[in-house]
Amino acid sequence: DIVLTQSPDSLAVSLGERATINCKSSQTVLYSSNNKNYLAWYQLKPGQPPKLLIYWASTRESGVPDRFSGSGSGTDFTLTISSLQAEDVAVYYCHHYYNIPYTFGQGTKLEIK
Amino acid sequence: QVQLQESGPGLVKPSETLSLTCTVSGDSISNYYWSWIRQPPGKGLEWIAYLSYSGSTNYNPSLKSRVTISLDTSKKQVSLKVNSVTTADTAVYYCGRSSTGFEFDSWGQGTLVSVSS
């Protein structure tokens, strides 16, 4: 199974500042045949359905604010929130869909400093 | 806008079968891929299984021998059965939809299932 390791486990950032979450894969999730990275990012808030933010590593889901961006390729990926808002407090997970079984990172808890 | 609503028994005894249902509203159940994902208390997310609208399935090998995913298009429901449950199956169970068979673009709010005698 592909293991996704996120860092840090928790993060406190001031409002308006940048937040960066990393996701490292135990093997590549880049398919050479189509040059796509099979990786997504989700936001989980208590009492709400999980929300897809980013797919194919860097494509923003419709309706997601443009302060959220994804980058990286192969085994190393980053979710960046350019200017943290209060409503961004949540747990963030990376997820690969390169092969079966799909797996998720352990999650990164984002708080306001 | 599609809405997914999971429902389940809340409490199941060890060794029994857990049955969960995801009811879809606001969109068709066809032409999508449907998954179940769970989150044990204090832990991360675990993908369980997916089912395409054409009927093909894929299961997490760690659970494959105990789980079955199915679709009832007339009721617009996706179901999951987990046999021989143990306390390790205690989790919030989510239903997820994918338009591509890969990322989950819509999720339900989840239903908590506890396994206890």
Image (spheres, rainbow, N blue to C red):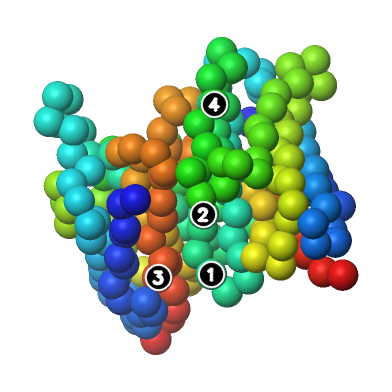
For disc 4, the marked residue is: B57
Q: Nearer the viewer, residue B35 or A46?
A: B35
Give the number of the disc on residue A108.
3
* Image quarter of residue B19: top right
Query: Does dot 4 land on a helix, a strand or a loop?
Result: strand
Chain to which the residue tagged by mark 3 belongs: A
The reply to whether residue A75 is visible in this rendering is yes
* Image quarter of residue B96: top right
For disc 2, the marked residue is: B46
For disc 1, the marked residue is: B43
Tag 1: residue type? Lys
Neighbour class for label 2 at 10 Å: few (<14), some, many (≥20)? many
> Is B7 located above or below residue B74 in the figure?
below
Tag 3: residue type? Thr
Chain to which the residue tagged by mark 1 belongs: B
Marks 2/1: CA distance?
A: 9 Å
The residue mark sitting in front, 2 or 3, is 2
